[in-house]
Image: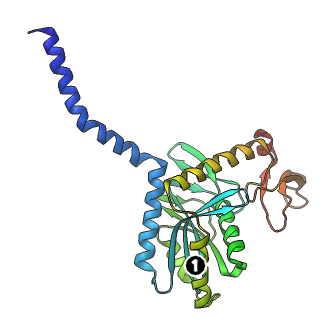
Amino acid sequence: MNVSYFITSLLDQLMAQMVYILPVLVLVTLFKSRWFKGKLGEFLVNTSAKLRLDDKIYHLIKNVTLPTEDGTTQIDHIIVSIYGVFVIETKNMKGWIFGGKDQRTWTQKIFKESHKFQNPLFQNYKHTQTLKELLQLNDQQIHSVIAFMGEATFKTEMPENVTQGGGYVRYIKSKITPVLTESEVKAIIEKIEQGRLISSWKTDRAHVAHLNEKSAERMNQNLCPKCGAVMVLREVKKGENAGKQFWGCTGYPRCRGVREYYDSISTQ
């Protein structure tokens, strides 16, 4: 058999197979990406809200990007009702989740591997504060909600507004005291729609670039992880940690953001 013919024939067969293999590889890579997992989590929240919440009472607004003094903030879902404005941050994760309300970072553990991620309550704090300012709401009229979708299991006690699966719907329905009138609900929806940036790939890309820039700034400055204000060195006065130093937000008591002393030094 002619060697060159054999090689050419083999290459032709490989190329023919690649036509089928490449799309599969692309799909597998896409399904494993953080972007896809995030979008899947948001889709599950959207679907659950539409099926389990009466749309005559609860008004869903999704993927809202709002301008802020230092750039933009992006909110996964806002649900507006007479029972308040619910600001939902979605996490599509698996494994064991460890964290506390006031900890800067939480931990995800899958078998023997662990990695840190930002406390989603801190992440959602800026969202709620931006909306409070835009809509002129008080603390009783706005609710921060964290919705973990996927197969995550909490291994530490979580606040009631940190939920799993459809638990965020139960949390929303647990608020039964009206804090807004129907006319106020309508006005809030209109104001959000007027204030949001156009939902597009360009808007998303600009927001990601802003996040990367802010993250780099925080790595080089001693800024509050919760609100971005300057932090000062303080000392625990009472309890078993008395004498221990920590970084506290200059916005205290409005903001209670803290960072561990050794942690902040390591990021300088």
Going by the image, does 9 lie left or right of 122?
left
Identify the residue shown where x is 71% and y is 57%: 103
Q: Tell which of 234 and 145 is nearer to you.
A: 145
In the image, is residue 265 above or below residue 71? above
Q: Confirm whether residue 177 shows in the render.
A: no
- The answer to which quarter of the image holds residue 182 is bottom right
Task: Pick whichever, 233 or 214, lies toward us.
Answer: 214
Q: Residue 168 in the image: state x and y as whole percent.
A: 52, 72
Residue hosting label 1: 190
Which class describes the residues within 10 Å of circle 1: few (<14), some (14-19), or many (20+)?
few
Q: Residue at x 43, y 65 (%)?
A: 44
Q: Can residue 236 be seen by looking at this rendering?
A: yes
The residue sitting at the top extreme is: 2
Q: Secondary structure at mark 1?
A: helix
Amino acid type of the residue tagged 1 in the rendering: Glu
**Residue name at image x 45 percent, y 54 percent:** 37
Q: Looking at the image, which residue is at 60% across and 90% down?
A: 183
Question: On screen, 82 above or below 202?
Answer: below
Q: Position of residue 178 (x, y in %)?
A: 62, 90
Q: Between residues 175 and 260, which one lies in front from this camera angle?
A: 175
Quadrant holding the N terminus:
top left
**Image coloring type:** rainbow
In this view, the residue farthest toward the left is: 1
Number of numbered discs overlaid on the protein picture? 1
Q: Position of residue 141 (x, y in %)?
A: 67, 81
When the figure is inspected, residue 188 is found, relative to residue 228, above or below; the finding is below
Choose between 248 and 71: the one closer to the eye: 71
Query: Which quadrant is home to the C terminus?
Result: top right
